[in-house]
Image: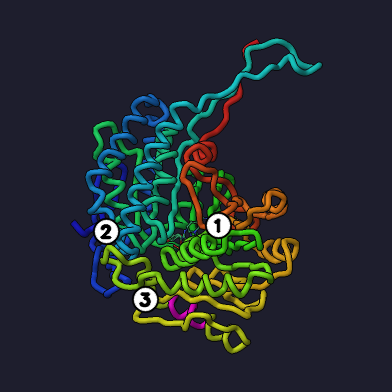
């Protein structure tokens, strides 16, 4: 089964014209998807609007059973889904399997979380102007949620939207990345074919800006949950109108290696954080600030750790890094490396691109204004920067329009405390890569990195409305 189909609610549909998805690794056609238009988006929204009424009336027990059933089916189809991710986006198969495992946890956790997300009673007599009442608030489904997702985690980032939205009692219209329609289709099918499904509560349409724009500008959705780039996030902010908009956008993650850190450990973690998924991670490690006393030793360890990573076919179980998503991404990354070298940067590993397979690139002698340092590279390039001390590192780390995640490697408790206080990001990690994400945590950024938080509990908060009640 390689054809993605539309879901207008629970009904599958095809179209005469389809788009072909070609493998980023070998160019073979791996899937097709119907080419949807504005009318399809409107049709899906109208169905969702009706379904939201029934979703709201359904019991939480049914919705939890629904998600747990999907999680069980994901276990059965794990290998097929992992292969589909690898086909469509070129992710090394070992990491595609990890993504399916994470997705199972995200779905399960969403059910478990919603089961215990109660409201609160409020003491209205705590105010001089108040009086004794029975006052409480509870969460109600927002209604229709539009979910728009990116290519780099084409399954788990869909799960981070569908699972919280549906278990909270909403109806959802999903528009997945055009780069992985079949992954999204297979996942959605598990929801739709479940015996516990709420009829028509999930629709899936395919396309890019035209369909996305029709979804976000409509008055039907009450929530737009978007994960993707800053430019598209900006468009959504400008055109969504009055509705909740949650934006998980780009980053430029950085770390500081303080002189008390375990350098060999830090280098291994930094290589993982900079090069996993070929740097195509919103919290990919891009900037490493190293205290000057230990700079030379760390640079040597870092280059050695990067050199050890296996680059090659994404279908090989041992491969750590496969291809980048498309030619444009390769050209942009290589162009930025070339211009940095012309301006004096020194590659510690020779930049190498074979087809779309980009080898790990460690750059030294960089300047803060070089694109490889200050832009989101979304490719396997990491820069080493010598700093005098923690103050110097903090100033440079925070000097970015992005603020998704930062980390610090240190064995000094006072540096740990200062890092938590002074680094300006949605997430701070001590003694691991900034690329660390546990799906249970609140996850999201400050500044251009976004608005709102994901992670089941926090996404449920974004996708529900608080209803406040007073009984006098
Ligand atoms: P993208 O912004 O190009 O596309 C994301 C989605 O937006 C796709 O489904 C696309 O079709 C859709 N889209 C495009 N134009 C639209 C429009 N006008 N209206 C509505 N939707 C539209 O992003 P990408 O290249 O798929 O993913 C990479 C980006 O995503 C990076 O910047 C990365 O940092 C970011 N990202 C962020 C997180 C996070 O949690 N913060 C996670 C993963 C990726």
| Residue 84 circle label | 2
Q: Are marks 2 and 1 in contact (CB under 8 Å)?
A: no
| Residue 155 circle label | none
Q: Secondary structure at mark 3?
A: strand
Given residues 138 and 318, the one toward you in this image is 318
**Would you call the spot at circle 1 few (<14 residues within 10 Å), some (14-19), or many (20 or more)?**
many
Majority secondary structure of magenta residues:
helix
Rendering quarter of residue 165: top left
Rendering quarter of residue 388: bottom right
Report which residue position mark 1 lands on: 434
Q: Nearer the viewer, mark 1 or mark 3?
A: 1
Chain-order first, disc 1 or disc 3: 3
Residue 471 in the image: state x and y as whole percent. 62, 12
Given residues 188 and 351, the one toward you in this image is 351
Residue 344 in the image: state x and y as whole percent. 62, 87
| Residue 357 circle label | 3
Given residues 89 and 197, the one toward you in this image is 89
- Residue 13 is one of the magenta-drawn residues: no
> How far separated are the C-alphas under marks 2 and 1?
28 Å
Which residue sits at x=59%, y=68%?
287
């Amino acid at each position: 089964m390689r054809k993605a189909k539309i879901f207008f609610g629970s009904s599958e549909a095809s179209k005469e014209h389809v788009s072909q998805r070609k493998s980023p690794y070998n160019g073979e056609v791996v899937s097709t998807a119907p080419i949807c238009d504005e009318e399809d988006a409107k049709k899906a929204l109208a169905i969702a609007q009706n379904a939201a009424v029934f979703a709201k009336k359904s019991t939480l027990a049914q919705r939890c059973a629904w998600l747990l059933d999907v999680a069980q089916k994901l276990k059965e189809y794990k290998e097929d889904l992992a292969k589909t991710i690898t086909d469509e986006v070129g992710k090394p198969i070992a990491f595609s399997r990890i993504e399916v495992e994470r997705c199972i946890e995200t779905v399960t956790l969403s059910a478990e979380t919603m089961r215990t997300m109660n409201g609160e009673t409020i003491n209205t007599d705590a105010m001089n102007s108040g009086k004794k009442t029975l006052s409480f608030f509870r969460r109600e489904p927002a209604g229709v949620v539009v979910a728009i997702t990116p290519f780099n985690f084409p399954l788990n980032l869909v799960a981070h939207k569908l699972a919280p939205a549906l278990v909270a009692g909403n109806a959802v219209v999903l528009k997945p990345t055009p780069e992985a329609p079949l992954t999204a289709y297979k996942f959605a099918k598990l929801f739709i074919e479940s015996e516990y499904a709420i009829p028509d509560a999930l629709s899936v349409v395919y396309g890019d800006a035209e369909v996305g724009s029709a979804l976000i500008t409509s008055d039907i959705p009450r929530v737009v949950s978007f994960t993707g780039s800053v430019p598209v996030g900006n468009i959504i902010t400008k055109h969504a109108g009055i509705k909740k908009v949650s934006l998980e956008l780009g980053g430029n993650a950085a770390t500081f290696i303080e002189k008390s850190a375990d350098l060999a450990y830090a280098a291994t973690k930094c290589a993982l954080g900079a090069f996993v998924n070929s740097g195509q991670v919103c919290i990919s490690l891009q900037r490493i600030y190293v205290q000057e006393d230990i700079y030379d030793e760390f640079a040597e360890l870092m280059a050695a750790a990067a050199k050890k990573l296996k680059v090659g076919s994404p279908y090989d179980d041992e491969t750590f890094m496969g291809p980048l998503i498309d030619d444009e991404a390769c050209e942009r990354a290589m162009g930025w490396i070339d211009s940095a070298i012309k301006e004096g940067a020194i590659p510690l590993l020779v930049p190498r691109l074979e087809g779309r397979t980009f080898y790990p690139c460690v750059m030294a002698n960089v300047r803060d204004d070089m694109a490889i340092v200050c832009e989101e590279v979304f490719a396997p390039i990491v820069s080493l920067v010598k700093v005098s001390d923690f103050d110097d590192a903090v100033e440079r780390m925070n000097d970015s329009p992005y603020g998704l995640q930062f980390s610090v490697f240190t064995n000094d408790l006072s540096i740990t405390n200062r890092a938590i206080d002074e680094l300006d990001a949605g997430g701070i990690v001590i003694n691991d890569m900034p690329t660390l994400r546990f799906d249970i945590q609140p996850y999201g950024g400050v500044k251009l990195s976004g608005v709102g938080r994901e992670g089941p509990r926090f996404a449920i908060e974004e996708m529900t409305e608080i209803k406040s009640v007073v009984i006098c």
